[in-house]
Amino acid sequence: MAVRAVGWALLGVLFAGAAMAAERQAAPASDSFPLATAYRIGGDETQTRFVLDLSRKIDLHAFTLADPYRVVVDIPEVTFALPPKAGETGRGLVKAFRFGLMMPGGSRLVFDMARPVRIDKAYVVDAATDVPARLVLEFVATDRESFLRKIAAENKTARAETQVPATTGATPPPQADAADKRPLVVLDPGHGGLDNGTKSPGGDLEKNIVLEFAQKLRERLEKTGKYRVLMTRTDDTFIPLADRVHIARSAGAALFISIHADWLARGEGDAQGATIYTLSDTATDSESARLAEQENRADVIAGVDLKAEPDDVAGILIDLAQRETKTFSLQFAHKLVGALKGTARLHKTPLKSASFRVLRDPDVPSVLIELGYVSNKEDLQSLLSDTWRSRTADSMTQAIDGYFATHIAGARAGTN
């Protein structure tokens, strides 16, 4: 223990003049939330310390998850004023980390670990003269068996207690109104909170791009007066994948549209244009399979333990959608492709299928649209253009109009 204490003391000295420090001049907070202004990581592959500077002392709860190895730290809502690339690289046992709003009133830090670790210490110290409050985490390397035994013994209850409840952070489902027969359209802006999604070479984040577009589409749909509209998130909040499905299902959605933006890594060629996906356990092609795998990792990114989901939600994620629902989804996808042809650039194969978790509700016709590629200069220019967003939202509204006109007419004919 004495050797370890000396090790931590030496790390403390290193932190004082650390070249590893990632600091930024913090602007005054516009709200009452604590402000995180800087962080430091020090240590090696046997023991590593993480320090986060805060404007005031807060509480924390830390736990571990396996496959991949992660440390998750839940804290009260914090305004993060860290550098743009904060967390992309780590040191010692920490490969990388992410941070963000998990729910109203709660933020989360998720650390990707290089190997199994034990959380040796996790605490926050009060501010002192000329020294800010500090959140301190000390990790010590361990073996996989001990890591898993620790989770089973101590973290099972803690993980269950910190699971994000369904609809947390989302707009509440609209109140049932027997007199309002308008279809409910649920718009699902992908990612959010500590899950940034893809990122353009210039740093534009997918989570912001798709939220702005969804807000524009909601505005267009509400303006028609034909629909009730619900968004799974209306701000930079993380919503687990199962909760997105639960929101649509519990609200009685007539149509679910998940909105994303794709990317291709440098060296994998170039691609551009919008693509509409429907559900299939067999991906149309390797690119579709890659994209589905990438999007389905959102909960892992946020440190959500999928094994702790209620059985009914887990069933939604693994059961095939009903045949009728899949047919309606495909009908809408075709209408969407037709409507977008005149206003938006389409991918060379604009209609595809893959196994996306958010499309697995057996009762709600669902599609996932990739608006374009943030890795493509022309697509990115469109995605950031308010004119393009307005024009594309108009086209999607026309497709929704066409879908419900046919669907409702067919339903009425069937009742005669």
Image (cartoon, rainbow, N blue to C red):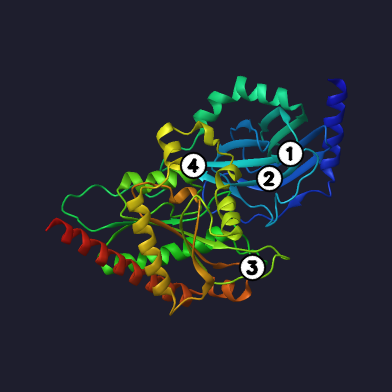
* Amino acid at the residue labelled 4: Gly
Q: Would you place residue 315 above or below residue 178 in this image?
A: above
Disc 2 or 3, which lies upstream in sequence? 2
Q: Nearer the viewer, residue 194 or 146?
A: 146
Q: Would you place residue 109 above or below residue 203 in this image?
A: above
Residue that badge 4 annotates: 105
Residue 372 horizontal/vertical position (percent): 54, 68
How many residues crowd mark 2 within 10 Å: few (<14), some (14–19), many (20+)?
many
Q: Residue furthest bottom?
A: 342
Q: How far apart are the alpha carbons under marks 4 and 3?
A: 34 Å
* Amino acid at the residue labelled 2: Phe
Task: Name the residue: 87% across, 34% down.
Answer: 10
**Tags 2 and 1 in contact by the CB under 8 Å rule?**
yes
Relative to residue 81, is residue 283 drawn left or right?
left
Q: How far apart are the alpha carbons under marks 1 and 3?
A: 32 Å
Residue 50 image label: 1
Q: How far apart are the alpha carbons under marks 2 and 3?
A: 23 Å
Residue 165 horizontal/vertical position (percent): 44, 37
Disc 2 or 4, which lies upstream in sequence? 2
Q: Is residue 132 visible?
A: no
Q: Is residue 392 visible?
A: yes
Residue that badge 3 annotates: 375
Q: Secondary structure at mark 4?
A: loop
Q: How far apart are the alpha carbons under marks 2 and 4?
A: 21 Å
